[in-house]
Amino acid sequence: MIPMNFLGEGQVADYVMTGSWADKAIKEAKLIGNTQVVASSEASGYMSLPSLQDIQPSDNAAYLHLTSNETIEGTQFKSFPDTGSVPLIVDMSSDILSRPFDLNQFAMVYAGAQKNLGPSGVAVVIVREDLITDLRSIFRLCCVTTRT
C-alpha cells in the first residue's frame, strides 16, 4: 500500500535492506514502481545494520522506508536517520509499544498488531497529516484515508 499511495511519477521509492522483513517490503514495492536500495547490511549477512550516516535518500525519493526491528536476524535500529525533507516511513511491527520513540521524526509508522498489539489481521497506521493531503492510491481499498 505504501508505494500505491506515495510513489509518484518520476520518483523513486528508497529502501534500507536489513533482512527478511525489509526484503518482503522491497519486493512488493518493485511491483508498483521504481524502487531502490540506498543502504544494505547484506554484506554482513544481515547481522548488523547500516550506519545512520550511510542511509542517504535519493534526490528524487518519494520516501525512505526501513524496518525498525528485524526479528529473524536479531537487529534493531536504536535511532533513525535524518532524511531531511524526504518522508521517513517505518515498519515497526516487531517493536511498536516495546520502547519509547519520538513519533515526530517519522512521516508514517505502521505495524501489524499480531506481535505487540492484538490479534492477527489488525494493523496500526500512524500518518503525518500533510502526507495524506494528495494521495495517489490506485485502488480505493488501498488508500490510507479510506480507513479514517
Image (tube, grey):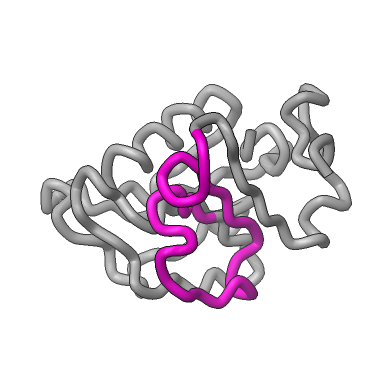
Q: Is residue 49 left or right of residue 53?
A: left
Q: Residue at x 82, y 61 (%)?
A: 130
Q: Which residue is drawn at 57% across and 49% down?
A: 110
Q: Is residue 38 visible?
A: no
Residue 54 versus residue 126: which sits nearer the camera?
126
Q: Position of residue 75 (x, y in %)?
A: 23, 58
Tell which residue pokes out farthest to the front in this image: 118
Quadrant (top left, top right, bottom left, bottom right) of the C terminus: top right
Residue 56 versus residue 68: which sits nearer the camera?
68
**Total marks in image:** 0
Query: Magenta region's main secondary structure?
Result: loop
Q: What stretch is highlighted in magenta?
A: 90-119
Q: Position of residue 82 (x, y in %)?
A: 51, 74
In terms of image quadrants, where is residue 11? Answer: top right
Q: Where is residue 21 in the image (x, y as percent from the top left)?
A: 35, 40
In terms of image quadrants, where is residue 95? Answer: bottom left
Compared with 44, 30 (above or below) is above
Compared with 121, 11 (above or below) is below
In the image, residue 109 lies in the stretch drawn in magenta: yes
Q: In this view, does 103 lie to the left or right of 6?
A: left
In terms of image quadrants, where is residue 86? Answer: bottom right
Residue 144 versus residue 131: which sits nearer the camera?
144
In the image, residue 23 lies in the stretch drawn in magenta: no
Compared with 110, 121 (above or below) is above
Q: Is residue 122 left or right of residue 5?
A: left
Q: In this view, does 21 lie to the left or right of 119?
A: left
Quadrant (top left, top right, bottom left, bottom right) of the N terminus: top right
Q: Can residue 1 be seen in this view?
A: yes
Q: Position of residue 119 (x, y in %)?
A: 51, 36
